[in-house]
Image: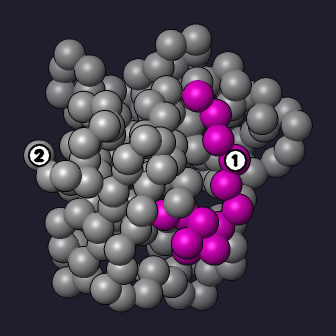
Amino acid sequence: MTAEAEGLSPLGRNLSESLARPSRTGRNRRFSARSGMMTEWLTAPPPRLTGSTMARILIVDDEPDILVILDRMLRRMEHDTVLAANGKEAVRRLEESPVDVVITDLIMPESEGIETIAVIRKRWPGVKIIAMSGGGRQSPVAYLAVAATLGADATLAKPFERADLVEALRHVLGVLKGQNP
């Protein structure tokens, strides 16, 4: 375990350590969280989603560490973010203000991600969805397959690399703009 990952939940620690490794593009991004605060060390500027505009993104996860890491990373990429700790809260946020993309965990208390995806697809069919899961007691593959069947536009198995999230965003934002992904 790296010093930067101390103080995080097990899932937050795994994601933090995964994001600290060099990405497939060769850029190195290191994340650290201590006492609820995250520090980011950059050796290259944040990735730009070529041809895309800033998106409003709702991040849904019951792990506060994951919310902080994704929020900071997406804001550095110049996206506007909204945070929710569970599916019930996510639906309330969507009722308050529209978003372009929802990035949601699948296993959460008070309305898990699978239920949330079904509600979003029914009430806000134009919203793009990226589902993510660490799988809980099982492999995340089964959960992510169900999410895709219910309408998730992209899926990510936790822990994932920053480059994987960037690629998923490129895909859903390209589709959102009517471009080829």
Residue type highlighted by circle 1: Val
Q: Is residue 79 magenta?
A: yes
**Residue located farthest toward the right when viewing the structure as drawn:** 96
The label number, if any, that marks residue 1 in the structure image: 2
Query: Badge 1 is on which residue?
Result: 82
Taking depth in this image into account, of 142 and 32 the one nearest to the observer is 32
Q: Is residue 150 magenta?
A: no
Which image quadrant is residue 165 in? bottom left
Which of labels 2 and 1 is toward the front?
Answer: 2
Residue 69 position in % (x across, y down): 45, 52
Taking depth in this image into account, of 7 and 124 the one nearest to the observer is 7
Residue type highlighted by circle 2: Met
How many marks can you see?
Answer: 2
Q: In the image, is 167 to the left or to the right of 129?
A: left
User: Disc 2 on helix, strand or loop?
Assistant: loop
The label number, if any, that marks residue 48 in the structure image: none
User: Disc 1 on helix, strand or loop?
Assistant: strand
Residue 88 position in % (x across, y down): 67, 20
What residue sits 18% from the left and 73% below the top? 22
Q: Is residue 181 above or below residue 98?
A: below
Give the residues drawn in magenta, as a range. 73-85
Residue 107 position in % (x across, y down): 41, 22
Which image quadrant is residue 136 in? top left
Q: In the image, is 100 to the left or to the right of 175?
A: right
Taking depth in this image into account, of 20 and 2 the one nearest to the observer is 2
What residue sits 11% from the left and 46% below the top? 1
